[in-house]
Image (cartoon, helix red, strand yellow):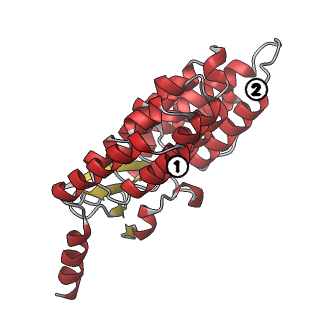
Amino acid sequence: MISLLLLAAFLQQLPTDAEADATLKTLKDELAQRGIEGRVAALKEALKTAHEKVIKAIADPLSKDADSVRIPAAHALSEVDHPASVQVLLEAIPANLNRPEVMNAISAALGTLGWEMAAGPLNELVKKVGETEVRAILPGVVRALGEIGSLSSVEVLAEFLVRVQGPRRNPWPNEGPIVSASENALRTITGADFRRGTDWEEWWKTRQGDLAGKLKRTYWSRKSHERTTIAPGEKAPEDSLLVVARLTDSPAAGDAQSPKKRKKNK
């Protein structure tokens, strides 16, 4: 009975549509009237109302405002554990590819949130390592992939290592940080430890079929915005979204502010 009362009390704290609309009106007014510091403060204050409407309103500042607004906007989104936060960050990538500092903030936010839905778009960036514009932001992208922990990144990162560890050529200026981040990400995602990309590829070929049954899955409740991690084979919670399926435990650095309250069923 006490647990039900506590849950009811928590649910009452989730913002209503009316509260979201009021927050959006205030945010619109303040973004139009205030300078950079004021706009940053307004965005942070608005995101205290963790409603999908409010989160999606951060899309324009994150893609169209000054870098000194975009960067804290990305940081602020990393503290709101909601699928809309991930969506807004991902949709801001095209507008920020040539802004390394903003992209680093976006990648860090995606890594902190740790939703697997971000892995696919980030994997695609790794595949574009031959493009100078993309290569400049890859260390942060790869670190985010390690924090997310999706097995979908293993083959992509292994193929990258094979590429750079092949026949001698002129190294890229930031090749070392990308290689180091890739090695660390692969270790974090799999729990295995190799140095050569060919060894990673061989390990993946022989092991990937056995790994699906060993994944721990984390779900996000639509009703409470709480996370629950379940063991392999356990039933998913009702009315929830899959956050991520991981082979290893999530690194502490990848915990968002909201998921500090996560519940784990062991």
Considering the numbered disc 2 on the image, is that residue within a helix, a strand or a loop?
helix
Q: Earlier in the sequence, mark 1 or mark 2?
A: 1
Q: Is residue 117 visible?
A: no
Q: Is 196 located above or below residue 48 in the figure?
A: above
Which residue is the site of mark 1?
75
Residue 265 pos. (x, y %): 36, 70
Q: Real-space Cα distance between discs 1 and 2?
A: 26 Å
Q: Is 72 located above or below residue 162 in the figure?
A: below
Of circles 1 and 2, which is in front? 1
- Residue closest to the far bottom: 2
Looking at the image, which is closer to me, 100 or 230? 100
Residue 266 pos. (x, y %): 40, 70
Q: Give the numbered dot on residue 207.
A: none
Q: Residue at x 57, y 57 (%)?
A: 251
Looking at the rendering, which quadrant does residue 117 occupy?
A: top left
Q: Give the numbered dot on residue 175.
A: 2
